[in-house]
Image: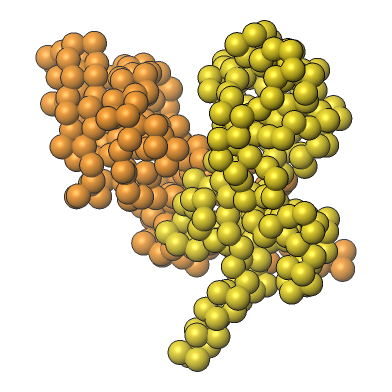
Chain colours: A yellow, B orange
Amino acid sequence: MTKEVSRRIDNINKHKIVVGVSNRHVHLSQEDLESLFGKGYKLTEKSTLKQPGQFASEECVIVRGPKGEFKNVRILGPVRKKSQVEISLSDSFKLGVKAPIKESGKLEGTPGIELIGPCGSVKLEVGTIIALRHIHMRPEDADFMHVRDGEFVDVEFFGERKAIMGNVLVRVSDKYQLEMHLDTDEANAVGIKTNDYAVIRKFAR
Amino acid sequence: MTKEVSRRIDNINKHKIVVGVSNRHVHLSQEDLESLFGKGYKLTEKSTLKQPGQFASEECVIVRGPKGEFKNVRILGPVRKKSQVEISLSDSFKLGVKAPIKESGKLEGTPGIELIGPCGSVKLEVGTIIALRHIHMRPEDADFMHVRDGEFVDVEFFGERKAIMGNVLVRVSDKYQLEMHLDTDEANAVGIKTNDYAVIRKFAR
């Protein structure tokens, strides 16, 4: 029995995935950035994120929906081809926007929203999503864990609010670092903070 | 294969548990109710809840913590022996109150909080909790599902955000109706609304 428990702990330790909790945030195109902050504007890096090259910027915007708004919503850099607003399901009720659960960048058919900056506002036609929970990993992590890019896995969380989440998307690239992304609803429901860890279900058995 | 799927669906249907999602709310003692609303005050029933005798009242209060406050927090009736404030983990961050996850009524060692009503305010010494997720059931439900009062079970949710939650408390009484209670973090994380259903894990296999 003790041997079995120690085997399981060992297995979990070898397969730990660090969690990053995403509060609501905005990605902007250069064009939308300039509409909000002025001609030729460049984002100022405030802190680096775990995914290489990504950063939280000093700049924030107001996100306004038909039923409510959030002030001080952080912009993440660098700029992208298309603007995108990532909110939680709780946020979607407060804003009054029926955002679907979508993979980042898959914006077709998603609702628009209004962004307000110090120099102007932008009405996005599309781009409001609830980010599909996912794991970023490098090809060598995927090999080690026997999973493939695009695969959906079950992920286990430990502690007082222990839980298993299904439908977690695996995304593999040599540009990534191993990290699971959850939104605030999901993190709070399972009592998890940034830098806690999770394990793909099969390694917790 | 088809037969196996239909057996599982049948099993799930027989063991469905309706879910009730609890937004932040307050239970009050008669003494605290009078401090907030005036001498001899009685709560006005707005709508009945699924648990027999329980109701949402017309009355709301402000709940104020060191970091923030919520206006229009609903009082649930009838009055109880001790006042109790039930919030989500998200709410606890906004209020700046380190509320523990506790069973209703188990208030020893829990943090206090300030309540503000139209006629005065009350500083509760204890009573702020994040409600431990739980299932109310009648003795005949418990028999049918082979569980006992006080037992912890795993509960499965279906759909886009499918998940299994561990550490769900079973509470059995002939004063209850069959219903699972989740807070808003938990409900949104698994994409569940009031009157959706869940199933104790062993019946979903």
**Residue A85 in which image quadrant:** top right
Left or right: B91 with respect to B118? right
> On the rendered image, what quadrant is the N terminus of chain B found in?
bottom right
**Camera sees residue B193:** no
**B64 vs B20: above or below:** above
Q: Residue placed at 53% from the left, 88% from the top?
A: A4
**Residue B172 in which image quadrant:** bottom left
Left or right: A145 with respect to B90? right
Image location (x, y in percent) of residue A81: 83, 30
Left or right: A129 with respect to B34? right
**Camera sees residue B67:** yes
Q: Residue placed at 81% from the left, 28% from the top?
A: A82
**A99 vs B135: above or below:** above
Left or right: A168 with respect to A69? right
In-front residue for pair A14/B152 = A14
Q: Residue placed at 52% from the left, 78% from the top?
A: A9
Image location (x, y in percent) of residue B130: 37, 44
Q: Residue placed at 46% from the left, 56% from the top?
A: A161
Image location (x, y in percent) of residue A154: 68, 61
In-front residue for pair B161/B144 = B161
**A84 vs A39: above or below:** below
**B160 vs A197: above or below:** above
**Residue A42 in which image quadrant:** top right
> On the rendered image, what quadrant is the C terminus of chain B found in?
bottom right
In-front residue for pair B152/A195 = A195
Image location (x, y in percent) of residue B49: 43, 31
Q: Residue furthest top?
A: A120
